[in-house]
Image: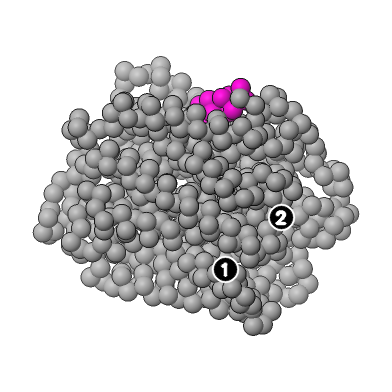
Amino acid sequence: MLNLRTISAGLICGFMLCASNLYFGLQTGWSTMGSLQSALVSYYMIGSTSNPKEIVLAQTLSVSAATMPLAGGFVGIVPALSMMGSSALVSWRSQLWWCFGLAFFGVFAAVPLRQRFLIKERLAFPSGTATAKLVCVLHGGNFGTRGEWSVLLQSFCGAFSFGLIAFFFPFITQIPFLGQKLAYYGWSFDPSPAYAGQGAIMGPVSGSSMLFGAILGYAIIGPLVYHLQWAPGSINDGTNGATAYLLWLALAILLADSIVSLSFILMSMLKSLFFLGKPTKSTESESLLALAQSKNSASYLVQDVNHDEQISMRLWLPGLLLSCALCAVTLSSFLTPWQSMIAVCIALIVALLALRALGETDLNPVSGVGKLSQLVFAILAPGRVLTNLAAGAVAEACATQAGDMLQDLKTGLLLGVSPKAQFHAQLLGSCASIFFTVALYRLYSSVFVIPSPDIPAPSALIWLDFANLCANGGAASDLKYLFPASSLAFIFGAFFSIAKHMFPTSSILPSPVALAIGLYLPPRFSLPRIIAALAAHAWSKLAPESHAAYMVVLASGLVLGEGLASVCTASAAALGAKPMYP
């Protein structure tokens, strides 16, 4: 089933999403698995002659390629090392070797968990389930008859055009809509189509939580610490200014949420072990049916495929051992041999926690498991920032790749796709994306200053600040009253995180992660997301049928279009092109 058109569609779509994830990850810390977008675009590229299994395989390949910037650390640890002046991971050879070391052992680690999480416990894995339903709709005979493809193409072209225009006229990305005085405090507006698409996808709870964080950070706390001289630098100074202060407060909230979330996950795992004899109730229907009018109507039952299509232990066990060994060797530049082995073992353990969270909530706490590994290495290797960063990166990479694999396997299970074929697609996509991601990162880093006001690299700053905290036990000395303020932020984050876990369906309680993002991200990056999230919610209430038909299509085109434009503009800048008007 992995034919040429499936591979081509998967790689093209995956590379577009990879470019979006890398560019917007460096800019705002945002990245997406993109399973729905991958299925949609793959179907568009392959055409109506495709069958559901081909789309699932193309989507699996696309997702594995799309998430390499996160799994390889190119939005986190790699720019963080550059910021601290380290010579590690500077050359293209070292970056390729690093990527190969981290890209595969999470994929192999997910394989034995398929039987446990998908067959026995039948965890929901909502994105995987939603992707399976979307594939059924695509092959149901009605999709595309209401102009969906036209919306996709127009939104893609519009976003692509905006990206080109914004390169030559960058002033349009910083509109001082509240005046120059408030713009100095960060309150400008970037009418980015991609940010709007991301906001529409992330939903109203996350959008309103980001708004709460933006008001708290840039309307209250930021101006306060600036005028009280608790942060002596300028407002936008990421070292000694209000932005640096807000970053530490956001880090405290994220750390609290990580600890609380992982604690609840651990309790859930222990409960499932003690009550193993009681099957977990499935959260989806027993079957997903293609629409009756489809020419190739069929039932997609929740039942496993034949033994010949399973991933045999003779394949995944040696692969897991070899990939873990490769990872340990890759880490030899940062860790001692025994530390490398411990880092890999910790990564496998905390990835197990992350996968259960992903299966139950659709949220993969990759940042949380990375910080948990960093906390362990604060004890094992005190005072070693490089060691701390590398240990956290391994845990994040394992959780990312394993989560992608299980989400895709869930889609395949619902649609009767061969797990072995999906496994091969995942490995192929990861391998191909290593070269693309490294080349693209080197292009971006040669054109853009990282960090800078336009590419602030917030994820890298959080990685670096937390590593410094774990290794050295402190933050920047010029920031006053930071410890008590961070302690209050930690309590604040823990309270809302506990409340969200106790009342998961509440639409009133803010998301601690989204709140923290809104707290440290300048409003010019968060406002378009917030507006689009709330607008999409209003759209779903006022015109639910239209929203169901066009929202994902529209948002996908916006994200992919501007993401691809970033590759073109970076390439043009590398060739000497410059903005026409600053």
Predominant SS of the magenta segment = helix
How far apart marks 2 and 1 lie (CA) works out to 31 Å
Between residue 12 and residue 485, name the one nearer to us.
Answer: 12
- Give the residue drawn at x 73%, y 70%: 183
- Give the residue drawn at x 22%, y 48%: 1
State left or right for residue 301 relative to residue 269: left
Q: Which residues are magenta?
A: 338-349
In the picture of the structure, the residue carrying the numbered disc 1 is: 570
Q: Residue 470, position in %: x, y?
A: 72, 33
In the picture of the structure, the residue carrying the numbered disc 2 is: 217
Q: Secondary structure at mark 2?
A: helix
Residue 333, above or below 240 = above
Amino acid carrying label 1: it is Ala
- Give the residue drawn at x 76%, y 55%: 238
Q: Residue 426, position in %: x, y?
A: 36, 44
Q: Residue 273, position in %: x, y?
A: 40, 19
The local crowd at label 1, few if under 14, some if 14 to 19, many if 20 or more residues have their Cα within 10 Å, is many
- Give the residue drawn at x 41%, y 63%: 556
**If the image is split into quadrants, where does the C terminus sit?**
bottom right
State left or right for residue 429 relative to residue 574: left
Q: Is residue 341 magenta?
A: yes
The answer, for residue 176, to whether it is visible in the render is: yes
The local crowd at label 2, few if under 14, some if 14 to 19, many if 20 or more residues have their Cα within 10 Å, is many
